[in-house]
């Protein structure tokens, strides 16, 4: 059954760090005044021309944590504004869309919360900029690593990692992405040892990830500590629609619980599969992946093959959008 036949409920999902690529947002900003305005306002808040870095690179600069995080956030916001503009809808970062739920992967939580009306754009970007800066500093101060574990049940992964930790390995689970993929994170030596043990225990493969550090692990402690004062001052409102948080994997409505989750997810696992299942349980058989890349589409399809996901991060994808009536 095609999703548009019965106009089902749909959710908006927002990507996190790693989705960036040189050239992102260039086509949107060339064609959409509202998208250009998002990056103009973003540049004013951040104090530099981030659109030129997104459009032209170099890749080494865009991939730096301090830049990739605000870049991805702004790209998601620009997509929402360009979509509204092309459909003749009011602005407000997608708040005129008839979505039924929202969630975001790691950094993507900030995008989801703006979309859900819980955060204002300017406030969110300011915190995202600081988050990227502080996480970059934490990466630079430690020898961190991450690896994706494929083809092994989660409970078996947890058991192997727990045993390794008892033996002194500094590593833990960082992302529960889907039944097919779990990510571990920690010190370089800890992740290497856990990877060896997981392969010996029967994992189909363990793939070292090209990342700057050990995200969602205790090696991010300094970032948590530095970001807390900024989050303490952040104005958060109850979301206008169901929002599923990474830290708990559950729907969260209370602003203080949202604040706590934004702080705790820096060092703790992202329960993405649980968030997606919560969205699906609301009857959202369709989702829009709002921002660069198609990573979330892959994860969702591994969680529920019947779910329809359209990735909208380019001008062409907006023109070809079919899955939902907005």
Image (cartoon, rainbow, N blue to C red):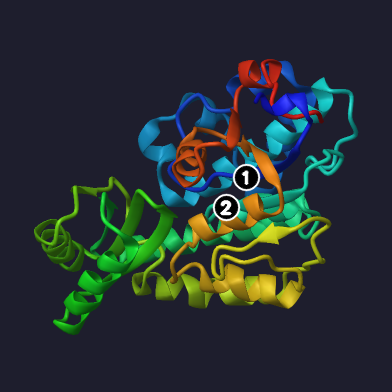
Q: Find residue 13 and name its label.
A: 1
Q: Quadrant of the C terminus?
A: top right
Up-down relation of residue 232 to residue 4 (above or below): below
Badge 1: residue crowd in 10 Å (few <14, some 14–19, many ≥20) = many
Q: Position of residue 143 (x, y in %)?
A: 23, 63
- Badge 1 element: strand
Q: Find residue 276 and name its label.
A: 2
Residue at x 68%, y 23% (from the top left corner): 29
Q: Are marks 2 and 1 in contact (CB under 8 Å)?
A: yes
Residue at x 54%, y 69% (from the top left corner): 247
Q: Is residue 142 visible?
A: no
Q: Is residue 254 left or right of residue 197?
A: right
Q: Is residue 96 left or right of residue 275?
A: right
Task: Name which quarter of the figure residue 168 lies in.
Answer: bottom left
Nearer to us in this view, 216 or 4: 4
Q: Is residue 303 left or right of residue 284?
A: left
Q: Position of residue 153 (x, y in %)?
A: 30, 59
């Amino acid at each position: 059954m095609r999703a548009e036949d019965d106009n089902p409920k749909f959710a908006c999902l927002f990507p996190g760090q790693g989705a960036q690529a040189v050239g992102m947002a260039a086509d949107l900003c060339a064609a959409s005044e509202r998208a250009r305005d998002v990056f103009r306002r973003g540049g004013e808040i951040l104090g530099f021309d981030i659109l030129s870095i997104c459009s032209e690179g170099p890749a080494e600069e865009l991939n730096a944590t301090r830049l990739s995080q605000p870049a991805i956030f702004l790209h998601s916001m620009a997509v929402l504004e360009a979509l509204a503009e092309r459909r003749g809808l009011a602005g407000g970062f997608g708040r005129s869309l008839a979505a039924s739920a929202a969630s975001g992967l790691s950094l993507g939580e900030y995008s989801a919360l703006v979309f859900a009306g819980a955060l204002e754009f300017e406030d969110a970007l300011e915190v995202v900029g600081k988050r990227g800066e502080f996480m970059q500093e934490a990466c630079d101060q430690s020898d961190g690593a991450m690896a994706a574990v494929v083809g092994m049940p989660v409970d078996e992964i947890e058991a192997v990692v727990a045993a390794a930790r008892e033996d002194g390995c500094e590593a833990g689970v960082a992302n529960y992405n889907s039944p097919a993929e779990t990510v571990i994170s920690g010190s370089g030596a800890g992740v290497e040892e856990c990877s060896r043990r997981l392969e010996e225990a029967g994992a189909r493969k363990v793939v070292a990830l090209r990342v700057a550090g050990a995200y969602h692990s205790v090696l991010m402690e300094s970032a948590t500590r530095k970001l807390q004062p900024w989050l303490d001052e952040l104005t958060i409102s109850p979301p206008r629609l169901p929002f599923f948080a990474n830290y708990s994997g559950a729907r969260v409505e209370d602003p203080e619980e949202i604040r706590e989750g934004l702080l705790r997810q820096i060092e703790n696992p992202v329960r993405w599969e649980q968030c997606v299942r919560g969205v699906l349980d609301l009857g959202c058989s369709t989702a829009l992946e709002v921002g660069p890349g198609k990573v979330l589409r892959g994860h969702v399809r591994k969680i529920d093959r019947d779910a329809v996901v359209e990735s909208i991060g380019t001008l062409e994808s907006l023109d070809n959008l079919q899955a939902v009536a907005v």
